[in-house]
Image: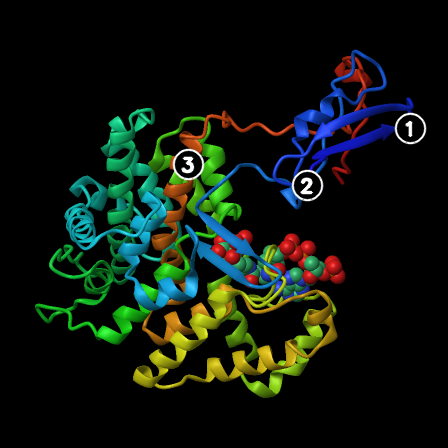
Amino acid sequence: MSDNRLTITDHRTGAQYEVPIVDGNIRATDLRKIKVQPDEFGMMTYDPAYLNTASCRSAITFIDGDIGILRYRGYPIEELAEKCSFLEVAWLLMRGELPTKIELECWEQRVMRHCMIHETSKKFLEGFRYNAHPMTMLISTTAALSTVYPEAKDIHDPVNRERQSVRLLAKMPTIAAYSYRHAFGLPYIYPDKTKSFTANFMHMLWSMVEPKFIDDPTIARVLDILFILHADHEQNCSTATMRQVGSSQADPYLSVAAAAAALSGPLHGGANEAVLIMLDEIGTKANVPAYIEKVKKGEVKLMGFGHRVYKNYDPRARIIKWAADEVFKITGVNHRIEVALELERIALQDEYFVGRKLYPNVDFYSGIIYQAMGFRPDLFTVLFAIPRVVGWLAQWEEMITDKEQKIARPRQVYTGYDERHFIPMEDRKPTTDLG
Ligand code: SDX
């Protein structure tokens, strides 16, 4: 069938309209010609929360939510998680192809060279209270880096964009580690660029009195895999925020800070921390049925379950479950995994969840692993932001170089008053009960 067009009949006027179909979709602006009166604005689509609206064309990540497929630049996430390092995947997402051996070696050296943060940024971190949430510290300090690199505002220069992107990728783990150590009043540990990206992060987090942190290679590899799984996920809430803020030509530090703010919400990247709080609230396997009933009554959400796109098992959750077993071989199994497995077992056979296609998502097991690896729950969303900065930057670069894109400004359906006129103070009626 080659006739790629939609014929729309407006029964208000009897008029018919032809709308071209491209890639199986129509352009919303093609509907503007549908009017009753010629001086009208024309028809729009109304789509709160963008449930059925594509905001861009992208070649970075492909998801098929019905059959649980996730690919970065065409490569299945399962193969990348098994065979690549995180920095290798970061190159793939940002450059479009897997790096050669020499490209990867140069890339690793380049990123590790930029891990230090300016000494003034450390003083900025000192301004936070001891109990400040690390995610808020990360968001604020990332935005503050915009003052350290004012040249980042020249977003039209591709060389400059690439340099700032490498700085952001390299400095997120350092800011994260310093935010964590600030909470304990511990001295900051400078990056060790002889270590891998992930092992260096653990070194900056946990090196205490011993001169060199002895990182367990299995734990470091599992964290690398978790970073790969979290690197990008097409137009999720935080990536859409990165594109929206970046579309005004704000610099990448401020755009990443905005994206990280979106990620921090409990419905998005904050879910992994919320899962652990939920598991601790449930306490034991015996309490699971009662909690499930609370969920079904709508009193609480089953955190770590459900997804806007995946209406089948999130392929990342399956890999994370494998990684959990590897970690528990080292750390020992904690009771939370037993509660989580019981929650999953019951939910996957309960019509409430099956009927709504609610399956475990990436956040359901990640919190349990992170806690077993020694991370505090308030660091979990920071652990999501560190790798996700790669996706945000790759999508930002794609948006800036996309000739179809311009400043993002949605329309609205106005539901307020028609024109009305000023009311003198003495004639106004109270709208609140001031008791
Ligand atoms: C991430 O978008 C991405 O790609 C995000 C992400 C990424 O990599 O960037 O994958 C990472 O954010 C994963 C999601 C982490 N969030 C959580 O685990 C929080 C709990 N999940 C829910 O809040 C919810 O499932 C969302 C936010 C994830 C998705 O919400 P939707 O698509 O708007 O679905 P919905 O709220 O319209 O729910 C449909 C129905 C509703 O029931 P009814 O009103 O039809 O009776 O399912 C119910 C919801 O009440 N429902 C849940 C539920 N999620 C949906 N009921 C109980 N527990 C849940 N978790």
Residue 406 percent coordinates (x, y): 50, 25
Q: What residue would you read off at disc 2?
A: 48
Q: What residue would you read off at disc 3?
A: 398
Between discs 2 and 1, the one toward the N terminus: 1
Q: Secondary structure at mark 1?
A: loop
**What residue is at 69 percent from the left and 66 percent from the top?**
299
Q: What residue would you read off at disc 1?
A: 11
**What residue is at 56 percent from the left and 63 percent from the top?**
68
Dividing the picture into quadrants, the one containing residue 163 is top left
Placement of the C terminus among the 4 image quadrants: top right
Which of the two marks, 2 or 1, is nearer to us in this view? 1
Given the image, on which type of amino acid does mark 3 rest?
Glu
Given the image, on which type of amino acid does mark 1 rest?
His
In the rendered structure, the answer to whether residue 16 lies left or right of residue 412 reads right
Label 1 environment density (alpha carbons within 10 Å; few <14, some 14–19, many ≥20): few
In the rendered structure, the answer to whether residue 155 lies left or right of residue 33 reads left
